[in-house]
Structure formats: C-alpha cells, structure tokens
Image (tube, rainbow, N blue to C red):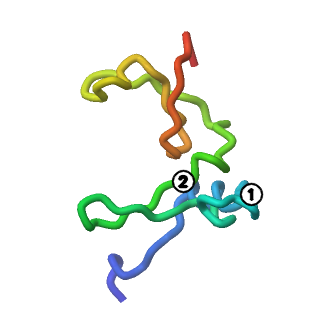
C-alpha cells in the first residue's frame, strides 16, 4: 500500500474528536466537519466544540480584514480581538 493511501489522524483532529459535544448541530459530535469551496472538499475542526485551549497566534500579512486579530492555534478558524496571547 502506498503512503498516500494511508490516512493518519492528526493530533488536532484527535483532540477535537475527544472534546466534541455529542449534541453539536454543526459537527454532529465528531469534532470536525466537511465543507466545500468551488467543489473541492475540505475538513476543519468544529469551532463550536473547540475549547480554544491551544493558544492564539497573531494574523499578519495577507489576512485582509483579519490582520491584527488573533486566531486559535487548534485550527478551528476562530478569531478574536486580543491585546496579547
């Protein structure tokens, strides 16, 4: 079996699955959900179930209106105004 055929769950997705709310309407208790942009499927961590406990990083550069905001390091996409991490 080729290496490309083997999918390994990342630590982020494993943690999201363990912390997921079983009654979440967005991810249905899986901790992640699939969305599509221009027909290309993507998976992301559920921002409703994420505890945002991995810290935050400052968005700088090419993030448009989100420059200067802080983004959750868990990968859920949650951003907020914050004076520091």
Give the image quarter of residue 31.
bottom right
For numbered disc 2, what is the local secondary structure?
strand
Mark 2 vs mark 1: in front: 1
For numbered disc 1, what is the local secondary structure?
loop
Give x and y (percent) for residue 54: 62, 37
- In the rendered structure, the answer to whether residue 12 lies left or right of residue 7 reads right
Q: Nearer the viewer, residue 3 or 58?
A: 58
Residue underneath mark 1: 21
Can you name the residue that lies furthest to the front here? 25
Q: Is residue 78 above or below residue 35?
A: above
Q: Earlier in the sequence, mark 2 or mark 1?
A: 1
Residue at left offset 35%, top offset 62%: 36
Can you name the residue that lies furthest to the right here? 22
Residue at left offset 45%, top offset 74%: 7
Give x and y (percent) for residue 6: 42, 79
- In the rendered structure, the answer to whether residue 44 lies left or right of residue 59 reads right
Q: Are marks 2 and 1 in contact (CB under 8 Å)?
A: no
Residue underneath mark 2: 45
Give x and y (percent) for residue 33: 52, 62
Which disc number belongs to residue 46? none
The total number of labels drawn is 2
Residue at left offset 58%, top offset 56%: 11
Q: CA distance from mark 2 to mark 1?
A: 12 Å
């Amino acid at each position: 079996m080729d290496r490309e055929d083997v999918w390994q769950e990342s630590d982020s997705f494993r943690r999201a699955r363990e912390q997921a709310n079983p009654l979440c309407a967005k991810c249905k208790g899986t901790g992640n959900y699939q969305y599509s942009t221009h027909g290309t499927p993507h998976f992301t961590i559920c921002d409703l179930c994420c505890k945002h406990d991995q810290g935050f990083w400052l968005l700088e550069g090419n993030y448009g209106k989100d420059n200067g905001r802080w983004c959750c390091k868990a990968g859920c996409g949650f951003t907020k105004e914050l004076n520091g991490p």
